[in-house]
Amino acid sequence: MIADKIVSTDELRKFGSEDGDYAGQVRALLAQQKTVWEQLANGFKSLDTVQVREFQYNGFTLKVQFNPGRITSSSAKVDEKSIKERKCFLCLQNLPVEQRGIAYGSDYLILCNPFPIFTEHFTIPHIHHVPQRIDDAFEALLNLSRDLGEYYTVFYNGPKCGASAPDHLHFQAGNKGFMLIEDQYKNLKTSFGTVLSRKNESEVTAIDDTLRRLITIETDSKQQAISVFNSFYEIYAAQSDTDEEPMMNIISLYDIDREIWRILLIPRAKHRPSFYFKKGNDKILLSPAAVDFGGVLITPIEKDFDRLTDDHITQMFNEVSQNKTFFRSLTNQLHQKLEEL
């Protein structure tokens, strides 16, 4: 069945791709799919009407994007009962007739996202219906961010942290530079960062910019990135006291000039802020995931976009992020663990 869902190399060449260049092929895929899939073309055309507001903080900027096309994802029911009652929209047999993709290795299919946030937006599901878990898929995330690194950043939303398909393993990718944290990273690291480990060409840093708390890995070694992530995961899962995946988002980008990965690990406390569940005018439909932590908050309802304030944003990050005490304990334990490696 997967062969029926793959765009041929010859077809991609018509849209400018070159063999062996995943990033170029993915860009060509989007151009090709816009010509044959009306829903997709309309989804990207709708980005022309997106509105943006900026909020200034101490040393960094956040944007809020009014994007009505994201209403399906932002309001998705991800409780166990709802998931069981709907067909999985990432399974091959349930993809739209027009949708085609690019095989990535033997396990993944790169697809265009018909409900885009980015001007180039992709979903990368596993070809089998396996749960959204990162512990055995982290290397795939690194490989994807390297192979797509010329144009794209790759990210992961945990099953309780913004993934609208928590029952099906998948990543997403979007054009580099869209998430403000990419350009602001060096300043955030300098102003709010604490180095946890610096060995060889690898550095691990904890950042608390007063709104967001994250741990970053910068390295030219895939094995070192995996080792640090495994240590983080082990400590975080134990501290979270859960048999399930501890709540997190991950942003991974690859600098093709310096040949290094930069991975942002974002531990989470909650999926959605309390005002998401309010009634009437008190309700604000803001459901943060990796892109929001990356500096672009997505609101699909215009009245929410218009009335969102600094206080709302601060409240949201305070509620959905792990608190300072938890984060300090997590980073202290990770520092000790990395010193022993």
Image (spheres, grey):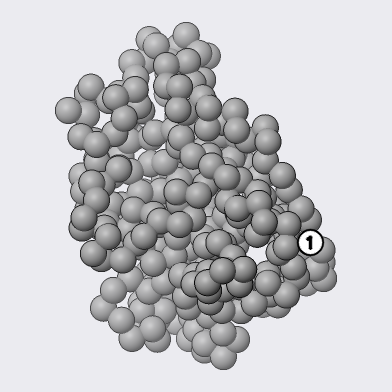
Task: Give the farthest residue toward the front.
Answer: 280
Quadrant where the N terminus lies?
Answer: top left
Quadrant of the drawing holding the C terminus: bottom left
Q: Is residue 228 left or right of residue 218?
A: left
Q: Quadrant of residue 309?
A: bottom right
The reply to whether residue 331 is visible in this rendering is no
* Closer to the camera in the image, 337 or 160: 160
Q: Amino acid at mark 1?
A: Phe
In percent of width and height, residue 115 lies at: 49, 39
Identify the image quadrant of residue 304.
bottom right
Task: Give how far across and how far down residue 280 sits, in percent.
Answer: 56, 69
Q: Quadrant of residue 38 in the image?
A: top left
Position of 183 relative to 280 (above/below): above
| Total numbered labels placed on residues in the image | 1
**Residue furthest left in the image:** 1
Residue at 29% x, 34% y is: 95
SS at circle 1? strand
Residue 140 is left or right of residue 50, and the answer is left
Q: Looking at the picture, does residue 85 appear above or below residue 214? A: above
Q: Which residue shows up at 23% across the image and 46% down it?
A: 87
Q: Is residue 25 above or below residue 74?
A: above
> Residue sitting at 68 percent across and 69 percent down?
313
Q: Residues within 10 Å of mark 1 (few under 14, many from 20)?
A: few
Asked if residue 81 shows in the view, the reply is yes
Q: Is residue 125 above or below residue 165?
A: above
Pointer 1 residue: 55
Q: Residue at x 26, y 47 (%)?
A: 88
Residue 84 location, x and y as percent?
20, 58
